[in-house]
Each structure stands twice: as structure tokens, then as C-alpha cells.
Image: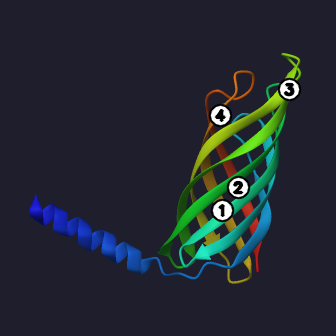
Amino acid sequence: MRKLFLFLIVVFGAASVAQAQRISPNALGLRIGDSDGFGAEVSYQRLLQSNTRLELDLGWRNSHHVDAVKLTALHQWVWRLDGNFNWFAGAGGGIGSFDNDRLDRSGTFVFLAGDIGLEYNFDIPLVISLDMRPEFGFNDHYRDDLDLDIALGVRFQF
């Protein structure tokens, strides 16, 4: 047990040193996709520390007779995989408004979100990513369950 504990300390220590890849101070672009319809978001990322960033997304969703506009904020940690590839994970939440034409209802909702994905930084100031964002919403008429939002992101770095 003691050897396993020491091994895990060494592995996590090496991982923290290996994540020292430079993240662009700012990135602006689009995030397109959804698990049960179509969605598009304007996405902004801001560097917080050497391996963490804030992501803000303002988007629109259209699925199963429901239109929604939502604002999402996520805190992400970024780790280098190999070369220009990174993987990231984060957590956050958001708020939105919806219009359900089948139930003839509209209103607001809040949600908690996680985020995990891969990204590739090109040699030009462009990054492309694929991520999955599990979202758990809180509203009886729109989002009271788990939604696995999968999307492709393309951002210009500056």
C-alpha cells in the first residue's frame, strides 16, 4: 500500500510538471453541436493561470419543439498530451431562457455543467476542439435531467 501511495505521488508530480505548455491568453470562436438537436455558441476563452482558463459561451439551442438561449461559464484545467494536442476538463454552470411551443410554456432555467475534451493547437493562431459537456438542468418544464452536449469548437487565438 505504501509503494502504491508513493507511486501515485510521483505520477501526479510528473503530470503537473508536464502540463507546462503555453495556453494562448485569449481565444474567440464558435462551438457547434448538441446531443438532441442543433446548437451554436459564440465561445470566448481567457487564460487565468499557466494551465487554467475561463470559458464563456453564449448560445442558441433548437431541439424537440424547444428553442433556448443560454450563457455558460466554465473553469477549465488544460494538460498537454503530445505535440500540439491538449486535453482539458472543467466545471461550471449557466443560465438560460426557453420557449417550448409544444407545451406552450416559456421561462428561465439554471444548470450545472462539466466539460471534458481534446484540442489541437495549429502552428497558426487557430485551435480546434471536440468536447462533451454534461449539463444537469433545474426547471420542471424544460431541463430537469441530464443532457450530454457534444460539440466541435473552432477558435482564433490572440
Q: Amino acid at mark 1?
A: Ser
Give yes or no for contact between labels 1 and 4 (Cβ–Cβ under 8 Å): no
Report the Cα–Cα distance between label 1 and label 4: 24 Å
- Check residue 86 in the rendering and tell me which mark sits there, or answer none: none
Q: Which residue is mark 3?
A: 106
- Check residue 152 in the rendering and tell me which mark sits there, or answer none: 2
- Check residue 129 in the rendering and tell me which mark sits there, or answer none: 1
Label located before the other in sequence (4 or 3): 3
Residue at 54% across / 70% down in the picture? 86
Give yes or no for contact between labels 4 and 2 (Cβ–Cβ under 8 Å): no
Disc tally is 4
Q: Which residue is mark 4?
A: 137
Q: Position of residue 132 (x, y in %)?
A: 60, 49
Label located before the other in sequence (1 or 4): 1
Report the Cα–Cα distance between label 4 and label 3: 15 Å
Q: Quadrant of the N terminus?
A: bottom left
Q: Is residue 77 left or right of residue 55?
A: left
Q: Amino acid at mark 4?
A: Gly
